[in-house]
Image (cartoon, rainbow, N blue to C red):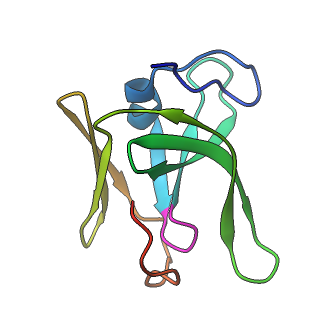
Amino acid sequence: MPDPNCPSCNKPIATGKLLKCAEVFDRATISAVARCPFCGNVIVFQVRNNRIAIGFTHSAGASRFEAVFEVEAKGLKCVRDKDGVHYTYQGKSYAVPFRKGDKEDKIGGHDT
């Protein structure tokens, strides 16, 4: 399975390392924000049915996530609770808090 590349420095980041670097989850766009461990730039990603999508968010009108590319991440799961999300991948768990001030999810029915 290929690892996602940082959109800024183009270095491959192991999926587990990207999840470990995740800082906050945005319920409005159903995406998380991490910082690249190499260049420090922001990476926005979304978990989709055993895949991880790297992209960006739009704020004009209704907030939404736009994928630029996806890579396979077999076994990657995301579960939400009252405080944030918990990603599990290859036997490890990564907790990511909701963005402060987030309202309830605006988009329903999306499989995270």
Q: Looking at the rendering, in which quadrant would you find the N terminus?
A: top left
Task: Give the magenta part as a residue range.
Answer: 26-30
**What residue sits 45% from the left and 81% below the top?**
108
**Residue 14, horizontal then vertical, whole percent:** 46, 20
Q: Nearer the viewer, residue 2 or 20?
A: 2
Q: Nearer the viewer, residue 89 or 50?
A: 50
Relative to residue 43, is residue 13 depicted above or below?
above
**What residue sits 28% from the left and 67% below the top?**
83
**What residue sits 47% from the left and 31% below the top?**
18
Per the image, is 28 magenta? yes
Q: Is residue 12 left or right of residue 112?
A: right
Per the image, is 59 magenta? no
Q: Is residue 33 left or right of residue 47?
A: right
Q: Looking at the rendering, in which quadrant would you find the C terminus?
A: bottom left
**Residue 59, horizontal then vertical, whole percent:** 76, 72
Please tell me in which quadrant of the rendered image residue 82 appears: bottom left
**Residue 84, horizontal then vertical, whole percent:** 33, 63
**Residue 47, horizontal then vertical, whole percent:** 45, 50
Image mark count: 0
Relative to residue 8, is residue 96 depicted above or below?
below
Magenta portion: prevailing SS class: loop
**Residue that protrudes farthest toward the left in the picture:** 91
**What residue sits 46% from the left and 80% below the top?**
105
**Residue that protrudes farthest toward the right in the picture:** 60
Q: Nearer the viewer, residue 44 or 50?
A: 50
